[in-house]
Image (cartoon, rainbow, N blue to C red):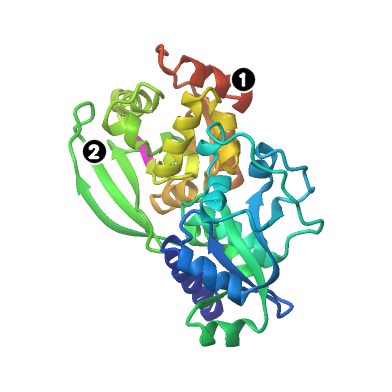
Amino acid sequence: MTHDTQANQLAVQRALADFRRGVPVVLRHDDGAATLALAAEVATAPWLRRFDAWGRPPLALALTDARARALNVRPSGHPVVLLNLDPWLDLAAIRELADATTDLTAPLRGPFERQMRPPTPGEQAAVQLAKYARLLPSALVAAVEGATAFAEANDLLVVDAAAILAYEPAASLALRRIASAPVPLEDAENTQIVAFRPADGGVEHLAILIGDADRHQPVLTRLHSECFTGDLIGSLKCDCGQQLRGAVEEIGQAGAGVLLYLAQEGRGIGLINKLRAYRLQADGFDTVDANLRLGFDADERLFVPAAEMLRQLGFHSVRLMTNNPDKVAGLEACGITVTERVEHKFPSNAHNEFYLATKKARSGHLF
């Protein structure tokens, strides 16, 4: 990794911390222009007043195209849509526009005036930064003059928009093996857990190594995205807990294999946003539409971390336990050979039957 790349990574990591705390950041464009950005979800009245005083009009609320569609805003043909901040849009209204869980309690909002232009790199980066910060993907944005001078004068962080847009794949590639220990499990006593930490200091991914797998043969493997509600407290809304424990049991019976426990809660949107998606599901939306209404893609996960963990463990081909063809394609796109898809399914219940049917009908899962 070059010095410039390391500097960009560090700047993005610092920007993530500021964004989560509700502090604006300055996003520098390649052409010298700049965007002032503030995460809509955590914006406060004092920062909003300063934001309004600093930015050149028209100020805008940047949303994903999916979130804009949920608000009945005409598509722009771009992944980020810009709504003008009309005077009636106070702080409470801005937060509500970002949060789809308020849609049914305040259904008569608008009409909204969309800016008839493509988003700048800084405006796109502002929404992406909110996603990486596990916030709702929306941000207040405004143009400012002279990125570096403006940031220094107002004690704000400046970061290149291009560094944000290229950030997560690069961070996911740089995983460091930091700890390992034998941990006998109920269904697989000969087990070792290995922890990998991302370069950005984020939440660690875990490799659960059962038995002593042959590195020269395709290894029985399960990629499992962490699920607090299903894995830890037995939620009946999904089948994650069954899949996790079932994979350990099946690999144990086979004699050897790998379970990768990935820090990608809620298909990559984070636990808090997953709870918001659950709220929307309770209101009648399916799991795909819930994510889209919040402004996310149906699945925000990356397969780069899983592939890198397998390589560092010495595995280059797998027999993948999954019902999701996207996992097969995603892992192979990252350089891991999938020699076989091993069926991995469990009975539904009254609480997750519709969820599982939606994954089959809309996400291509095989059951």
- Tell me which segment is drawn in magenta: 256-260
Q: Name the residue under label 2.
A: 191
- Is residue 5 located in the magenta-colored stretch of the structure? no
> Which is more toward the observer, 310 or 364?
364
Q: Mark 1 points at which residue?
A: 361
- The picture quadrant where one finds residue 202 is bottom left
- Is residue 259 located in the magenta-colored stretch of the structure? yes
Percent across and percent down for residue 200 are 42, 64
- Label 1: state its secondary structure: helix
- The picture quadrant where one finds residue 245 is top left
Q: In this view, does 91 lie above or below 110?
A: below
Q: How far apart are marks 2 and 1 (CA)?
A: 36 Å
Percent across and percent down for residue 356 are 50, 20
Q: Can residue 165 be seen in this view?
A: no
> Which is more toward the observer, 100 or 223?
100
Main structural element of the magenta stretch: helix, strand or loop? strand
Kind of residue at badge 1: Ala
Q: Do the residues labelled 2 and 1 touch (CB within 8 Å)?
A: no
